[in-house]
Image (cartoon, rainbow, N blue to C red):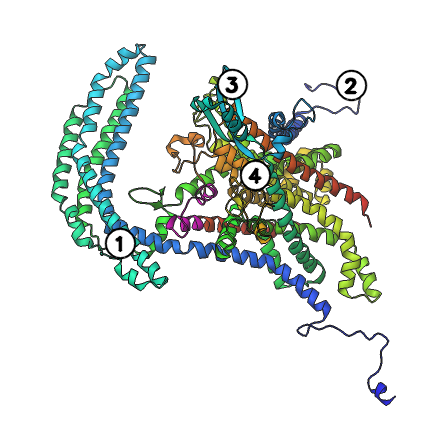
Amino acid sequence: MEATRANPHFLVNRSRVRLFGLSFDDCIRVFFGGNAVVSIIVLGLITFFLFREGSGFFGQNRQNLIVYRQAGLEYVDFIRAQQDDHTALTRYLSDLRLRQFTYATEHAPMSVAAANASLARFDDFAGQFGDTVEPLRTLVSDLTEQASAIKTKFTVMEDKKEERRQLLDEGRAGDAAKVVITPVDFAAELKPILGTLPAYRAASAEFAQGLERVLATAPTLPTPELQARMDRFKLHTRDYLAGFPAVTTQLEAWDYTKPVPASQAFTSFIFGREWLTASFWQDWYGVIPLVVGSLMVSLVALLLAVPLGVGAAVYVNQIATPAEQKFIKPCIEFISAIPSVVLGFFGIAILGQALRALSQVSWLSWVPGFPYSERLNILTAGCLLALIAVPTIFTLAEDALNNVPRAFKEASFALGATRLQTVIKIIVPASLSGIISAVLLGLGRVIGETMVVLLCAGNRIAIPDFTAGLAVITQPVHTMTGIIAQEMGEVVQGSIHYRALFVVGMLLFFLSLGINYVAQRIVRRYRISIG
Amino acid sequence: MSTPTPSHVFQANLTPARRRESLIFGLFGGATYLVLLCGALVFGTIIFKGAGTVFQAKAPFINTSFLLDAPESLHVFQFEGKKMELGDRAFRLFQAEHPEVAKLKQESYIYSAGGIFPCIVGTLLLVVGSMTIALTLGVSAAIYLNEYARDGMFIRFIRLAILNLAGVPSIVFGLFGFGMFVIFFGWNVSLIAGWFTLAFMVLPVVITASEESLKAVPKGFREGSLALGATKWQTIRKNVLPYALPGILTSSILGIARVAGETAPIMFTAAYVVRDKLPWQVDKFSDFFFQGVMALPYHIYVVSSKIPQNEYTERVQYGTAFVFLVLVAMIATTSIILRNHLRNRYKW
């Protein structure tokens, strides 16, 4: 009896299970809490794994650039650039020829043969102009071979090193010792290339003379407009000629031992204008063409989607009858459920052709870029992406409009404003922050969209030609998302190309986080409420 | 003076301002219906052109071989003045009977004959697996956020993470899944890698949906239960979850549509271009999780980009798109209808 008094006997006497000092209820709470943390963990893991796979890129890219310099590829590219500029000039000439030809056949009606005959003198001039580069071309092709040979030697050496390393890893030291590694003596290897400098000087001088001589024989063209073009061509050529000494000094000053700064591995990625992989000469990983492609496609998509999405939101929220609302909202939700790959297929199978056919209708030829021949281009992809962005923009903008306090509208009506004035001057401005963030989230959706751009943007890796003006939207591009989807399956794991794709993914990831952040800030900062 | 006099007092006066108003409102309405028209156009085209593949004039009216066979190559050739279009198996049988066929000029198109059964199965498996993971994680997270958490730094941080996770592009999830599950964990291209990748992608949708449903359960339900002496967990299990569950499930169906529809995340984590075996034809039980599968969205990508477009390939292209679109549309419709139904049912 005494004992029970000391330990009072409760009616409810359930032994509590304790785990690490936690009661059952605590355990459950911790379990749920743990699941809530998953989203943070996933976000962290995404960052980590993108960095893990991508971070090696910059080191490899620097190595890539160092080899580019040490093997003399950079040296050869100076001369090649000179040659390429000449090619650009000849292209200008052939464009000029086309203009003359069109002029001859359309304005001064001539048969095709007669038009060609009238251009004989011009053709002669163009042909001679094209031939002047010959001495340089021979030199470049020789040097290309030599430099590639050095690079190949270096690659072979690297492969051998890798082989030895692997053998050592497997513990086969004997076999490893047998792998002969002949280090590449760049100084000795580069000697023949550097020795061509006098030859280059001679070739360049001959080239310059040839250009001068040919330029003096330039024909005069029939119309002032064409002649102006010819004069511009002459001016370009003179500028080009004036640049020759600069190339020579560049070549003289070139030194293969000059170190490649670490920052260049980064800048050549961020500001690089070329994305060139699996090339026999030199791979470039410049992200600009992809970023520009993504932005162009998104811009076209938003230009279409913003008026439609916001217009529809205003209509449904302010103007439509309840019956209409009940019909339209689920329909737009339905559109958002269309899988992007189906839209992409629709673009390839139908929209691409339809838009091209539309562009070839004669009374639409005033539209910039019409008619065009590439079926898959910025415009096609943009139109489809607009359909993806509209539901996002619509839903969020409609929410924002819904959140405008009723009193605003009533006050406006009470002051005698019409419905239109109320919508345009009160409701929309009041919800502007929400609408802007809706547009931004739409942008995020469009930039991250993969399948549509992969299937419909044309996949040409080049910065679109902005000199074409608005017609630029009818050119094919490649995008950040598209390149990852397209090339990821084909690359060797751990190669520089593989890592480059992860870095592009990283860029996309941070871009989307940034857009999200700005959208949230705008909503929070400019939220309007009563009182 | 110039405005026409109304025939009765209450008739609207068509002033220029009013005319401008109706014009601009008309523009807004036009934008709305243009969007709907575009959506209907996409739906209509795919359904109209794809119906030819999936349905047929004879009983049972549904082209069962398209739905239940594996993809095959299509062989097209002229034989004794007739144009023959045969799938791989039929072609081999035919060749055994008529050996001279081998010498005939023939064209072949991959994936253009047979059906898409492995793709349908693969997509279903991916959806079921990833939704199981996503629902487990998502509902638990939502319970924590709505029932247990006090507002503070930590919770705000979690919400921020969820919000940001929702904005991450699907291809980045694909890269992440590839880097983590396929390479780091060494799971290779497999169902399980695809499950986790898709589950993480759809997690924000599930969490948001679940939280909303939990919020809709009145506070009094919890207070009543707690007042009777139930523990927190008993309250949640008996008095909150049963009322929130229908809402959670229906809202999550929208997540299913997303999981089924995405191609980019499974491209390098789970999808094979072609696979002869069906998922259940495995040697060991554990192999089931570590096998790649064919999936409808990826199959559409393959047949629309890797094979030419002509009258022979069109059949499978539109057919696959049709089946896929109908599948996703059905899921979306179910979700929308169920949600509306539910809104009317629980009112307290």
Q: Is residue B66 visible?
A: yes
Residue corresponding to mark 3: B83
Q: Is residue A49 left or right of residue B248?
A: left
- The Cα atoms of the two marked residues, 3 and 2, are separated by 73 Å
Q: Are marks 4 and 2 in contact (CB under 8 Å)?
A: no
Q: Earlier in the sequence, mark 3 or mark 2?
A: 2
Residue type, mark 4 in image? Pro
Residue farthest to the bottom, as pictured: A2
Task: State the image coordinates of residue A167 (x, y, percent, origin top left).
Answer: 33, 60
The reply to the same-chain question for discs 3 and 2 is yes
At 52% across and 57% down in the image, what residue appears? A45
Structural distance between the alpha carbons of marks 4 and 1: 44 Å
Q: Which residue is mark 2?
A: B7
The residue carrying pointer 1 sits among few (fewer than 14), some (14 to 19) or many (20 or more) residues within 10 Å by Cα, namely some
Q: Residues within 10 Å of mark 2 (few under 14, many from 20)?
A: few
How dense is the environment of label 3, judged by Cα within 10 Å: few (below 14), some, or many (20 and up)?
A: few
Residue for badge 4:
B297
The residue lying toward the viewer, choosing from A27 and B307, is: B307
What is the C-alpha distance between the residues marked 1 and 2? Answer: 97 Å
- Measured along the vertical axis of the image, is residue A124 above or below residue A393? above
Q: Tell me the element at label 4.
A: helix
Magenta stretch: includes residue A453: no
With respect to residue A216, does A59 lie above or below? below
Residue visible at 82% across and 50% down in the picture: B348
Q: Which of the numbered marks, if any, corresponds to residue B53?
A: none
Label 1, label 3: how far apart the Cα atoms are = 58 Å
The amino acid type found where label 1 is placed reads Met
Range shown magenta = A480-503
Camera-side residue: A196 or B288?
A: B288
Q: CA distance from mark 3 to mark 4?
A: 32 Å
Q: Tell me the residue that label 1 is attached to.
A: A157
Q: Are marks 3 and 4 on the same chain?
A: yes
